Image: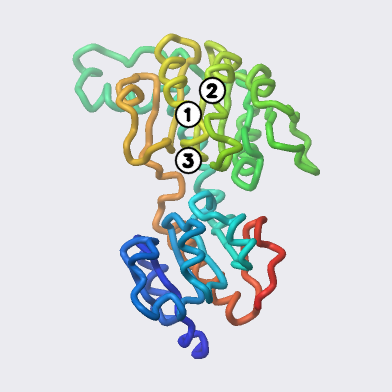
Amino acid sequence: MSALKDIVVLVPGRLHDHAVKRVEETFRMLRIERADPALLLAGMADEIRGVAAMATIDPAFIDALPKLEIIASFGVGYDHVDAKYAATKGVMVTNTPDVLTEEVADTAVGLLINAVRELPRAENWLREGRWVREGAYPLSKGTLRGRRVGIFGLGRIGLAIARRLEGFGLPIAYHNRRPVEGVGYAYHPTLVGLAEAVDTLISIAPGGASTAKAVNAEVLRALGPDGVFVNIGRGSTVDEEALIAALSDGTIRAAGLDVFADEPRVPQGLIELPNASLLPHVGSASVHTRQAMADLVVDNLAAWFSQGRPLTPVPETAGLKKP
């Protein structure tokens, strides 16, 4: 690995401490406050061959690094990196799938149970002393029994969620851009059609222009008054104003959300709703899983520079060869 020490890898902005430590140990690391070409000192840009980042990497920043070969992104979602543009410049982009799949799927099921059975509200009832003063917490109006689940985005995590919910005895359907080969779940070619067929919608869809506000008022109406919506994917896929309205007026029963459109700023309208279970984007946030993600960021860089191919390229750049 000593030859890798001559390779300059840039870390713009914040990155998981374990990833930073490993980049520093493995490569010659440079750091700047954010991914801004104006922060590149004289001569720095011509040295950088790799980037390890959680930050937004746009075309202007890619253009500012003429020797750049690879962007190793932290996270399974990589909409903060312009991978299509990177591909046109011959720059490999990688992400960190698989290692967080099970953790995020666990969180999705937890959110669903919280939303349906009102468990956070029941816990607050106990903590506030109301069990003693007022008696038992009221019976929850929702239940998992008899529910039909639709998954928006049946990728790795969506499949892991589906497997868990099959164990609960719940039927599964899904919507993707196209059917998934080898899957026996019912496929719906439109998101509205999926929502009409189920009463529980779990979104694990990626961000980007094609999914922006895909879960809108029409979809929520189709889900119905016993409907429960869970989002563990990207906040940008939901029309949050429509969701607030649907939860407020009984269009749907409840929601469980781990992601939001403008994090960490969560709309006050959501915070005030008693039928919304809200988490601060903790889907993969265990020490175990985040360290595995950090390792994969650096392992992708090391594999690219030592073997000529990364471990987990994103689809847009999967066909690129090392120069």
Q: Position of residue 43 (x, y in %)?
A: 39, 80
Of residues 45 and 18, the one nearer the viewer is 45
Placement of 65 over or under 287, stated as above or below: below
Binning the other alpha carbons within 10 Å of mark 1 as few (below 14), some (14 to 19) or many (20 upward) gives some
Placement of 172 over or under 76, stated as above or below: above
Placement of 65 over or under 224, stated as above or below: below
Residue flagged by tag 1: what amino acid is it? Ile
Residue flagged by tag 2: what amino acid is it? Asn
Q: Are marks 2 and 1 in contact (CB under 8 Å)?
A: no
Nearest to N terminus: mark 2 or mark 3: 3
Binning the other alpha carbons within 10 Å of mark 3 as few (below 14), some (14 to 19) or many (20 upward) gives some
24 horizontally vs 172: left or right: left
Residue identifier under label 1: 113
State the image quarter where residue 114 is shown.
top left
Q: Position of residue 280 (x, y in %)?
A: 36, 40
Nearest to N terminus: mark 2 or mark 1: 1
Residue identifier under label 2: 216
Q: Element under label 1?
A: helix
Residue flagged by tag 3: what amino acid is it? Thr
Q: CA distance from mark 2 to mark 1?
A: 23 Å
Residue identifier under label 3: 107
Q: CA distance from mark 2 to mark 3?
A: 23 Å
**Residue at image location 54% in from the left, 34% down from the top:** 212
Of residues 3 and 274, the one nearer the viewer is 3
Q: Element under label 2?
A: loop
Q: Position of residue 185 (x, y in %)?
A: 74, 33
Give the quarter of the figure containing the C terminus: bottom right
